[in-house]
Amino acid sequence: DLHLLSRRQRQMCIRDSRKREFVGYEYKEVCADKNQISFLIDGYENFGWEVDGNVCEKADAGRNPQFQNKRILHLKRNRKIVNKMELTRLQRNFEACVNEIEALEKAKTSKATMRALTVGIVGTAFMAGATFAVTADPPHIILCIILAIPAFIGWILPYFIYRKTAAEETEKMNRLIEEKYDEIYAICEKGNRLL
């Protein structure tokens, strides 16, 4: 506490606080999933950024539900940082890799979803044919049965197709994601050396 120090020590503390140099900062906001915040903070620190006062705040979820799990990360960096051009280039590579990882995560289930939906729609088309066959005048019961069998198969199979395709795609995408993480760590290491 300042009141416990002697008068001379207080004057030294005040004089030292006045000697601080001016630092001009540039600021950046990054919107990301809350489970990625620590990873992004660690990454951006390698390009000279540091977390600004209010670490992260919840993105505006009221207007758009896609921002439900998003947080805004506030960063700042000294404007006169050494090797700024090269650090900015490396930072862009880092951000591109992060975006690619996000796209690969989404790709794990997109192909499986499309296959399952396609089979389900084909099954529904067969069921429509079966319905029209049985409601025709006179009813075509045999045609209804013939069309109903692939219809029920088309309604049951999507679940199994989704699970199988999603497992295959997840395995394939996880390898690509690991390669991207390795690339990110190499980029961050270069940036750290430049600092």
Image (cartoon, rainbow, N blue to C red):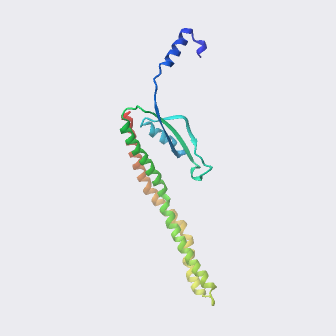
Percent x, y of residue 108: 48, 57
Seen at 38% across and 38% down, the residue is: 87
Seen at 54% across and 77% down, the residue is: 150
Q: Which residue is farthest bottom?
A: 138
Left or right: residue 64 versus residue 21 is right
Seen at 36% across and 34% down, the residue is: 83
Which residue occupies the foreground of this view, 167 or 68? 68
Percent x, y of residue 136: 62, 87
Residue 122 shows up from this direction? yes
In this rendering, is residue 66 above or below 127? above
Question: Image quadrant for the N terminus?
Answer: top right
Question: Image quadrant for the C terminus?
Answer: top left
In this rendering, is residue 28 above or below 116? above
Left or right: residue 99 versus residue 190 is right
Residue 190 shows up from this direction? no
Which residue occupies the foreground of this view, 101 or 10? 10
In this rendering, is residue 140 above or below 19? below
Seen at 46% across and 28% down, the residue is: 23
Percent x, y of residue 91: 41, 42
Percent x, y of residue 100: 43, 51
